[in-house]
Image (spheres, coloured by chain):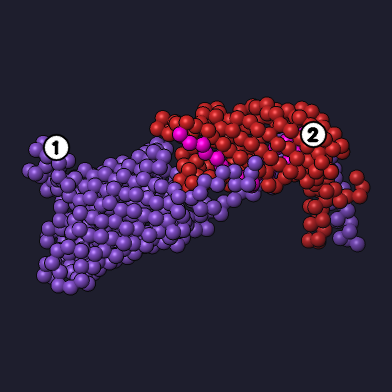
Chain colours: A purple, B red
Amino acid sequence: MKRIIIAFTLLTLAAGLKAQQMDTTKKAGGKTSSTDSLLNSMSSDDKHQDVIGAFKATRLILSPTTTTVKKNNLNFLVIHRFGDIGTPAGGGRTLIGLDAVSDVYIGFEYGLSDNLNIDFGRNTIGGLIELGLKYAVLHQKMDDSSPIAITFLGEYGVRPYGSFSSYSARNSYLGQAIISRKFTSALSLQVSPIYVYDNTALPDVAGNDKGFFALSGALRYKVTKHMSLIVDYEHPFSSFRTGANGFSDPLGFGIEIETGGHVFTLNITNSRAVSEINSLSNTQSDYGRGQFRIGFTISRMFDFNHHDKGNGYK
Amino acid sequence: MKHILLFLLAWVTVHQAGQDTYVCKNVKINLYSSAPIEDIEANSTNGVSVYNSTTGELEFSLPIRSLHFPKALMEEHFNENYMESDKFPKATFKGKIEEHPDLTKDGSYPVTVTGDLTVHGVTQTRTITGNLKVSGGVVTMISEFMVKCADHRIDIPQIVFHHIAESIRIRVSATYTALKNNNPSK
């Protein structure tokens, strides 16, 4: 009985409130009308969506990013590193190293699915040919149910030319877990633990490690909608690859410009090599010795999806 | 007690939105840009709309991310560079139909709606024409109108100027269902 009374009281109360509400909405010119609240209740905020555009390109200066090429898309890459700017070989004689070529990478990345990419490319240094698979295992979500994105990358490298003791001695392997987070619409950071194994130590010097761990960190800061500043750094954890033995950590600074289907990166780095296998194993060029250079990346995306006009909508 | 509260909630909701309220949860929106180099089209079926036939109020809401493009890169650029959908996740329209079409009679009624169109966080008062059709108690609305990118502070850089039109054609199509009123007292 008590319950019924309570219910009844509530009902009458609600009806009274309702009548009042009707009056106020009419006075307010329908600004807080029931239509509004109904629309708001219907349009669910879908916050469980993937965060997009943590990085514009699949590569920064030294590191690959968590970004993958989408299904049936082909990314064509030309990555160039010029000669030393600050050594006697650079300067005015070679127009700050622009006459010289340290390394050129020409390659392709293809989206087998939105999350799985296959890549293929060739580097000038060592004639290294690379074949890789990249898989986006986790996407950052807008509601932070997943605060980070994780992409795995595996690369196989082979040096077809030069004298090696056997075929397997030509091979190198790289495994990398790329972890990124887009903190704001402008700022994205990523860190990647890496393991490199060269069947022939690179450089092939007594005491050098064939296999070693490395860590890379990169930052992208969007200055305008189409231009970003990028910083990219790598550090190999190798007892042999130390400053005392003449090695340096690769470090790059750059500007990334996006224009429709192209992404251009203009950068300065001490690393001569484009490939991570080469740059992590053997960077002996140092900013302090003037051994830094201009580099650029041209990335052009081709979309092979059928242009399904209309999608059933007329 | 739980049940009573639930009932109460349902009762209040039903009362607020009476028989004169029509809703559509799958508004079809088509976006079309025609420029010298390419034509770009995107579609969504995730818009929602509420129409109150007594007051003439008509509202739409569209999640920007639900617009899908044939090219993945276009969709990313649309969200990242032009619509900034992380900051402005929705486009809305809140207006009133000037005419009072008789929804009990089958027929096709040209309608004029005046209200606020909010895209990219910028609100413009617009008068948009469309057509309201009643057929066997089912209300359908269609409309086609242009939205100027500049009106909503959507910048198109010079470099892609020949790829993206200055004015985007929007087509809207919504089929409404009446909100049922279960309260016998009314």
Name the kind of residue labelled 2 in the image.
Ser
- Mark-to-mark CA distance, 1 and 2: 73 Å
* Rendered-image quadrant of the N terminus of chain A: bottom right
Assess whether residue A94 is covered by the magenta stretch: no
Q: Position of residue B81 (x, y in %)?
A: 46, 39
Rendered image: mark on residue A116: none
Q: Circle 1 marks a residue in which chain?
A: A
Where is residue B164? Give x, y as percent.
Answer: 48, 33
Residue position marked by numbered label 1 in the rendering: A95
Q: Which stretch did the figure color magenta? A: B37-60
The crowding category of the residue bearing disc 1, from other C-alpha atoms within 10 Å (few below 14, some 14 to 19, many at least 20), is few
Name the element at disc 1: loop
Q: Is residue A151 visible?
A: no
Q: Residue at x 24, y 47 (%)?
A: A80
Q: Return the residue at label 2.
A: B108
Q: Are marks 1 and 2 in contact (CB under 8 Å)?
A: no
Q: Residue furthest left?
A: A88
Q: Position of residue A284 (x, y in %)?
A: 15, 56
Measured as percent of width and height from the top left, residue A243 is found at 14, 58
Q: Is residue B168 left or right of residue A98?
A: right
Residue at 51 percent across and 49 percent down: it is A306
Near-viewer residue (B105 or B123): B105
Question: What predominant SS class does the magenta segment belong to?
Answer: strand
